[in-house]
Image: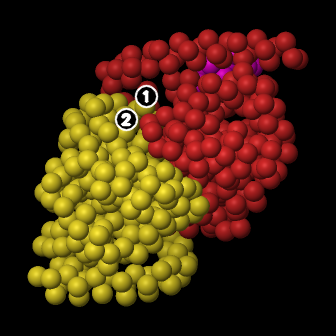
Chain colours: A red, B yellow
């Protein structure tokens, strides 16, 4: 199985590295980070990774993965990426959108009429693209696997491995990475975190939210004109 | 606060990238990956990252972080790394060992008489260095924070942030990365995974275990001679 993960600057690194750890441990699977060029890719908090392929050199995807973050917003109107996402999603057996990665899948017209989720601060924006918005941590609709924010990509990667390679493989990986999580605090969703924490995170994210609203509106208009 | 993370080839990438995501989101904290040289570092499953500092150029650590994996085993007898680990652990306010990273802290003589944990497949080896072995996912003894395997570094990083920057900051990060985990299966520890899964993972890890036993014995002998 060939797994291709979209790699763009300013993406959230754990969106990629969490699922990468799970997917790359699956026997017989090859995981490549696919970027615009072979230049190092700086993620949003400074960690810099090397791509393995460009869009031109990458092998056809069996599993196609789109992470999220500001870097994904920045390519919502980029035809080269939208064409690549459309082509690879069509040929892949599984398409996996993490965090706000589903916005790019939606902007490519792939989620119209489907159920999908995203990071809790952005998932409502999926509706602009004709998506039935899910509040769940993991949402599966046909071959489209979409997860909530950042860390939910780890849970969903185990789901993808279970569905594509069997539950035994997924459970072995879960044990090898000692994944029996125990966050020190209750929280982690707008429904489980204290209200003042939710308010503070929304406040911190106001500017990004405004930019994302504008970009998704433009992307939705462009998609509308194409149909 | 200056956070320095040891970066060596063949380390487990999620050992670094999980805690990195949490630590780097803490306001005012700078996170650097510190390597032997500025050459790209290939982690055990192929993901390649760029170091930010060498041991010589790195700033003094306020928080010092050691990830795990085969690459850490490989430096258990490396004096340049052992000296660096000893110096930075002494000056740091918090020392954080993830997965088998605590083996390197132990080999540097830092955990003698202390309670510490590690990946479930390796934690018993800490006893060779005079460590009181913990089976817990998170173990705190003074300034030494040691976690179990791979993903437990995310839980422990939130603990470190809470202790060093306050619970409000940690809870905001938990919500921003939507960390209300929901693994698709029960498991993830030798106590919670099905026995046949535990057996299979132990079987797969036999060769690595043998190598690790040999290296830790040599490192323990060398430490003994130094004292």
Query: Taking A216 as reference, is B179 left or right?
Result: left
The vertical placement of B29 against A79, above or below, is below
- Residue beneath label 2, please? B25
The vertical placement of A104 against B61, above or below, is above
Q: Is residue A124 magenta?
A: yes
* Residue A32 image offset from top left, x and y in percent: 68, 53
- Residue beneath label 1, please? A191
* Residue A20 image offset from top left, x and y in percent: 59, 53
Query: Taking B48 as reference, is B132 left or right?
Result: left
Query: Taking A197 as reference, is A111 left or right?
Result: right
Q: Which quadrant of the figure contains the N terminus of chain B?
A: top left
Q: Magenta segment, which residues?
A: A123-130
Rendering quarter of residue A142? top right
Residue depicted at x 56% and y 15% = A211
Q: Quick check: can you spot residue A118?
A: no
Residue depicted at x 73% and y 45% = A54
Q: Chain of mark 1?
A: A
Q: How far, Cα to Cα, is label 2 from label 1?
A: 22 Å
Question: What is the secondary structure assignment of the residue under circle 1?
Answer: loop
Q: Residues within 10 Å of mark 2 (few under 14, many from 20)?
A: some
Q: In front here: B173 or B67?
A: B67
The vertical placement of A56 against B78, above or below, is above
């Amino acid at each position: 199985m060939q797994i291709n993960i979209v790699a763009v600057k300013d993406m959230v690194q754990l969106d990629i590295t969490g699922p990468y750890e799970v997917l790359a441990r699956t026997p017989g699977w090859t995981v490549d980070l696919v970027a615009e060029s072979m230049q190092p890719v700086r993620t949003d908090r400074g960690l810099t990774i090397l791509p393995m392929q460009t869009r031109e050199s990458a092998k056809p995807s069996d599993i196609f993965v789109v992470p999220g973050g500001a870097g994904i917003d920045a390519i919502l109107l980029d035809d080269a990426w939208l064409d690549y996402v459309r082509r690879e999603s069509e040929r892949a057996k599984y398409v996996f959108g993490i965090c706000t990665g589903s916005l790019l899948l939606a902007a490519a017209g792939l989620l119209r009429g489907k159920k999908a989720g995203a990071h809790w601060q952005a998932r409502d924006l999926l509706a602009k693209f004709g998506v039935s918005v899910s509040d769940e941590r993991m949402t599966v609709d046909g071959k489209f696997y979409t997860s909530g924010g950042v860390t939910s990509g780890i849970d969903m990667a185990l789901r993808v491995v279970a569905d594509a390679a069997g539950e035994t493989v997924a459970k072995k990986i879960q044990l090898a990475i000692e994944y029996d999580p125990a966050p020190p605090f209750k929280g982690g969703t707008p429904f489980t975190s204290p209200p003042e924490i939710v308010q503070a995170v929304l406040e911190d994210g106001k500017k990004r939210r405004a930019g994302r609203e504008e970009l998704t509106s433009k992307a939705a208009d462009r998609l509308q004109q194409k149909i």
